[in-house]
Image (cartoon, helix red, strand yellow):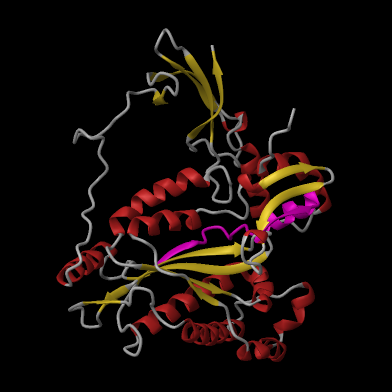
Amino acid sequence: MERPAPEVADIFRDFGPAWRDASRGHVSHAQLKVMNAIEACRTAALGGYVARCENADCRHTVIAYRSCRNRHCPKCQGSQALVWMEDRKAELLQVPYFHIVFTLPTEIAAIAYQNKASIYALLFKAASETMLTIAGDPKHLGAKVGITAVLHTWGSAMTHHPHVHMIVTGGGVSPDGSRWIGSRPDYLVPVEVLSSLFRGRMLGMLINAHHAGRLQFFGNYKHLAAKGAFKAYLGPLWKTDWFVYAKRPFAGPEQVLAYLSRYTHRVAISNSRLISADQSGVTFKYKDYRIEGPDRYKTMTLDPGEFIRRFLLHVLPKGFHRIRHYGLLANTTVTRADKLARARQLIAATGQVAPARKPPEDGTGEETTRPEGVDHPCPHCGGRMLIIERFEAPRSPSHPRSAPFSILTINTS
């Protein structure tokens, strides 16, 4: 019988204890918390309940366990992405949207790992200021655009590769707020100009952060604490081309949202990419972006300890926001809702009709509610699933009891 494909949680449970011992003193508390959460997710360790269909002819029974809700957990991000996408529907504009990617060079990525909170924040700031500045320049678009930016810190093989994905409105509000200025259908702003300004902004911000003592250096980079050495390290980067990528516009706002939701709640590797895991190694699928066509899809095998190390490279600092909004989508003295309402008025004046957004309904015009004690309808007959038993998790600060329930196993009696 063929063994089922593993999950990240299985790899942590099977190989995590030995890796923790071997890496003692080199693993942060935040990384250990992520491991603990993923290992416990949707297991009895977090508590749960038993529910049974009230239909006497069905009596379908399920055992459900709580989810960890950790933002690095591959199991939890799918449902959270759906919630996030539903919340964003009211913010869509009936205009083209563009996907822009700003990537840090390898040399800066190396020191970013030792300064995650500082340099990731600078990446957001440099990329957003670059986009708003070039879009606002009368020589280009000459308007304030709306931006949703998402930080990713990994490449397909889970190496450290910090970059920001931006979804940008294909047009914006004029500086005087009197009209909507639309972009060309297949063109927003020149990426060469974005790349040049992004390079200058980011390098300037890094130098200022170093002078202010906000950067730390360890190991092979310890010498960069000296101002002269840091300036010399950055020197060659002023002369290189920085990678800024622009994709073609989407077919429509709904496609934008579906596409973006896949980015907002993605983690370093999804369970669906895992093929096998044993003492000889963890094998998974990845893309080689240097190759075009079907040959870019490959497999890689890593030692279990190296797989765990790479996964944990991407644990974010506590409280760090990896999704941020700028321009028309920023909440400033004028709220996001007010700016979007004004944008819709201006878009309508151009002859484009912005879609009306209504609260979700069940088709009757009445709010849908579930009876107390019912978590979901029966998957077999559609009847009501009633909770017949609850069981609590062992008290542990690593596993909050407030996490929602998720079904793990199904038994039919």
The C terminus: image quadrant = top right
The part of the image, by quadrant, that contains residue 351 is bottom left
- The residue positioned 71% from the left and 75% from the top of the image is 217
Q: As drawn, which residue projects farthest toward the left?
A: 349
Residue 23 position (above or below residue 45) = below
Where does the image place residue 204, in percent across and percent down from the top left? 55, 87
Whether residue 43 sits left or right of residue 308 in the image: it is left
What residue appears at the point 62 percent right and 66 percent down from the top-left corner? 292
Residue 395 position within the rendered picture, expressed as x and y whole percent measured from the top left: 60, 33
Q: Is residue 314 magenta?
A: yes
Viewer-proximal residue among 229 and 378? 378
Q: Nearer the viewer, residue 192 or 137?
A: 192
Residue 103's place in the image compared with 45, above or below, is below
Q: Is residue 367 above or below residue 126?
A: above
**Residue 145 visible in image:** yes
Q: Is residue 223 left or right of residue 270?
A: right
Residue extent of the magenta highlight: 296-325
Q: In the picture, which quadrant includes the N terminus?
A: top right
- Quadrant in the picture for residue 96: bottom left
